[in-house]
Amino acid sequence: MSTGTLIIIGVVVVLLIVCALVAWFVTRRRHLRERFGPEYDRTAEAKDGRLAADRELREREARHDALNIKPLPPGVRDRYAEDWARVQERFVDRPDDAVHEADRLVTTLMSERGYPTEGYEQQLKDLSVEHGNVLTHFRSAHEVNDRSSRHQATTEELRGAMVHYRTLFEELLHNGDRPRDSRT
């Protein structure tokens, strides 16, 4: 074989390897974008780049895979649904207390499902793997809950927080399946 032929074969092999790596990288990023939804862009912005975001989100996946996340048995799910209905009923007379209770109920539900609840930021990271599409709701509700603790939230903001908590609550309650409709 001539030197020219060997060079052409070498270039083709290198190009094939580069194409395979690019295809793998694009497929992996697409997977992360689909799995994490809006959380992908949020993480990329926070990490100042997509490569750092990809690394962070893969670490979240690895941590999540090590957790023992489980669906709720029907009886437990029904009990939580009843608890949620009681929290919503309390909103009429005591909106601040209802929002605080909604936060506690969501945290308890997370724990029952197998999510660690050691801190808000870690909760966000752990939930992002399967529930990235509803984290905006959780963030909004949590912000109002914090402001409510300082008596700085309006009744309308508290109502909004209940709606946001309900979105996450139902997602967790039904393991990400479409929940039945309920009203605040």
Image (cartoon, rainbow, N blue to C red):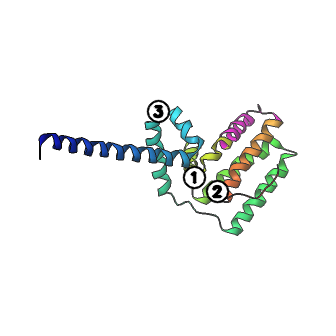
- Residue type pointed to by label 3: Gly
Q: Which residue is mark 1?
A: 130
The answer to whether 9 appears left or right of 149 in the picture is left
Q: Residue at x 73, y 33 (%)?
A: 150
- In the drawing, what numbered circle is on residue 49? 3
Q: Tell me which label, 3 or 1, sits earlier in the chain.
A: 3
Report the magenta residues as a range. Answer: 138-154
> Which-is-in-front pick, marks 3 and 1?
3
Q: Residue at x 78, y 60 (%)?
A: 82
Q: Tell me which label, 2 or 1, sits earlier in the chain.
A: 1
Q: Residue at x 62, y 59 (%)?
A: 112
Is label 3 in a helix, a strand or a loop? loop
Is label 2 in a helix, a strand or a loop? loop
- In the drawing, what numbered circle is on residue 176? 2
- Residue type pointed to by label 1: Glu
- Residue type pointed to by label 2: Gly
Contact? badges 3 and 1 (CB < 8 Å) = no
Contact? badges 2 and 1 (CB < 8 Å) = yes
Looking at the magenta stretch, what is its main secondary structure?
helix
